[in-house]
């Protein structure tokens, strides 16, 4: 399992992770639940009409924190909007519950992929392990 697959699996196992963005000079944190690999990149999904999407578009540097079974991850990087139908469809196929709110061909569905990502896996019983992708 490569670094990106390991990060994606950890986020899925955690179920909920917390995404931090910037709103001007104010940090904003909210729960998220999508993590999907498409064409060799790690993606997450939201709606373009939401403040979080607007914050990412204004400043694409984000950080994620998630905890699972006593271990946690901090993932930082830059998010890039991928407006292609195929990317949106792949995400929605992976998360059928979103299909009641989003469609691959609507003007609201937003999928973002990570670039320049750095993930640190931590626990109380082992040294931190950092990897990039």
Image (tube, rainbow, N blue to C red):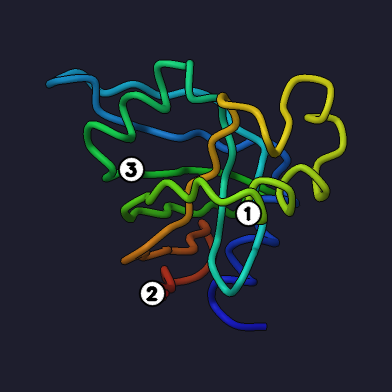
Query: Nearer the N terminus, badge 3 or badge 2?
Result: 3
Q: CA separation, marks 3 and 2?
A: 15 Å
Q: Residues within 10 Å of mark 1 (few under 14, many from 20)?
A: many
Query: Nearer the N terminus, badge 3 or badge 1?
Result: 3
Q: Which residue is situated farthest in the left direction here?
A: 25
Q: Mark 1 = which residue? A: 87
Q: Secondary structure at mark 3?
A: strand
Nearer to us in this view, 58 or 5: 58
Relative to 52, residue 87 above or below: below
In the rendered image, is residue 69 in sight? no
Query: Nearer the N terminus, badge 2 or badge 1?
Result: 1
Q: Residue at x 41, y 24 (%)?
A: 52
Q: CA separation, marks 2 and 1?
A: 22 Å
User: Image quadrant of residue 51?
Assistant: top left
Q: Mark 3 = which residue? A: 62
| Residues at circles 2 and 1 in contact by the CB criterion of under 8 Å | no
Q: Which mark is residue 132?
A: 2
């Amino acid at each position: 399992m490569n670094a990106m697959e390991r990060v994606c699996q950890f986020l899925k196992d955690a179920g909920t992770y917390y995404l931090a963005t910037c709103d001007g000079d104010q940090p904003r944190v909210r729960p998220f639940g999508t993590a999907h690999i498409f064409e060799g990149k790690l993606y997450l999904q939201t709606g373009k009409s939401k403040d979080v999407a607007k914050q990412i578009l204004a400043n694409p540097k984000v950080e994620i924190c998630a905890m699972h079974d006593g271990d946690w991850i901090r993932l930082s990087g830059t998010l890039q909007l991928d407006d292609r139908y195929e990317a949106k469809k792949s995400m929605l196929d992976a998360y059928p519950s979103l299909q009641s709110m989003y469609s691959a061909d609507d003007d609201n569905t937003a999928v973002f992929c990570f670039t320049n990502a750095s993930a640190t896996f931590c626990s109380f019983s082992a040294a931190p392990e950092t990897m990039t992708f």
